[in-house]
Image (tube, helix red, strand yellow):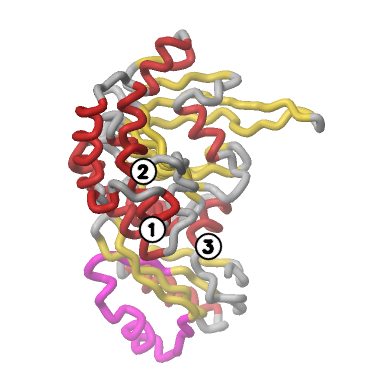
Amino acid sequence: MEPMIQVENLCKSFSTKNGTVEAARNISFSIEKGEIFGIIGLSGAGKSTLVRCLNLLERPTSGTVRVNGKNLTKLSEKELRKERQNIGMIFQHFNLLMQRTALDNVCFPMEIAGISKKEARKKALEYLKVVGLEEKALSYPSQLSGGQKQRVAIARVLASDPKILLCDEATSALDPQTTKAILELIKEINRDYGITVVVITHEMSVVQEICNRVAVLESGTLVESGTVEELFRSPKTEAARRLVFSGRTQIQKMEGKRLVRVTFRDKSSFEPVIANLVLTYRTPVNILYADTKNIGGAAEGEMILQLPEIEEVADKMIQYLKDTNMGVEELKSDVG
C-alpha cells in the first residue's frame, strides 16, 4: 500500500543578503496511513520549513512531496488548493480569529467551503463536543485558556474533514498537564477518525507520549529515523543523544570515569537488576539518574550509573548488564 506521505530528496534553500541558506538538505522519509509520526530537532534544525513543504506552503527547491499518491509539486495552484483541504494544521499560537466566538471559529472553514450557515453551526457544535468544549461555544478566544484555545483550533481542523493533521509545536505554549491532555486528544482523533498525524516538536517527551516513529533533524538534514523505542533505547547520532538527554534539567554535571546509560523495558523495569549487580560483584555503583517513561504502552526505564574505576570490574559489570538484556551505552562524562 502506498504511504500517505512520501518525501524524496527534498531540498529547500533561501536566498538572504548573507548568501544562500539551506533549510532542508536531501530529506527522504515516508509516513504510513493512520500513523502518528514525529519530526524532532532543536531550534533552527529546519522543522518548520519541512512541515511547510509537506503542504507546499513552501515550494521545495528540488525533490518531491507525494500526499495520498499525488505529487504535490506537479499540481496547478487550483489542484493544490483542493489537495490542501485534506491537510489540517495546528500551531503553537492557535491562530484563532479573536473577534469570533469558539463556535464561529469552527464554522469558518465550512463557510469558506460553501456549507450553509445552519449546517455549519450544527457540525461545529458536534466538533466542539468531540474536543470537550461545547459549553464554551459562545466564548471568545480571550476568555479561553491556552488548552481550550488549542481544542478550538483542533475542532476547526476537524470541520474540514482532513486526512492528515500537521501539528507544528502545537503544545509548546502549554504547561505539562495541559500538554498531556492535548496529546491524549490528538491520539483519540487519530484512533477514532483514522487521521494521519505529523508532530513537529523539539521536545522528546512529546514524541515519547504520542508517536509511533520519529525522524531526527539537525541543521536541515535528517540524521536518524526509526521507532520511538529504538531512539530512546539506543540513539545513534550525537543530535539524537542530545534530544534523548535533554529532559535531564536536574543534572548539572556528571563526572566520573565510567558512566553508562542503561535502558530497560516492561518486566525488567521491576526487577532488582542493579541490586543483583552490586551483590554479584560486591562493589557499589552510583545511580546518578533514574526515570521510567511510558512509550507505546510499555514501561521504558533508563538509569545513568557511575561504575567503579577499576577497569576490569567495570567491564564485567557492563557485560553482566548486557547479559540481562539491558540496553547499555557508555557515555562520555558530562552528558547533562
User: Separation of disc 1 and disc 2 at Cα?
Assistant: 23 Å
134 vs 263, left or right, is left
Q: What element carries label 2?
A: loop
Crowd around label 2: few <14 · some 14–19 · many ≥20 (10 Å) = many
* Circle 2 residue: 101
Q: What element carries label 1?
A: helix
Crowd around label 3: few <14 · some 14–19 · many ≥20 (10 Å) = some
Which contiguous range is marked in magenta?
262-287
Based on the displayed image, in which of its 4 quarters is residue 205 positioned? Answer: bottom left
Q: Residue drawn 51% across and 25% down? A: 57
Marks 1 and 2, the one that precedes in the sequence: 2
Q: What percent of the width, then of the height, locates residue 330?
A: 52, 66
Total numbered labels placed on residues in the image: 3
Q: Residue drawn 52% across and 83% down? A: 308
Q: What percent of the width, then of the height, locates residue 120?
A: 24, 30
Whether residue 39 is in magenta: the answer is no
* Circle 3 residue: 246
Q: Nearer the viewer, residue 157 or 55?
A: 157
Crowd around label 1: few <14 · some 14–19 · many ≥20 (10 Å) = some
Whether residue 264 is in magenta: the answer is yes
Q: Which of 221 and 153 is in front in this view?
A: 153
Q: Quadrant of the C terminus?
A: bottom right
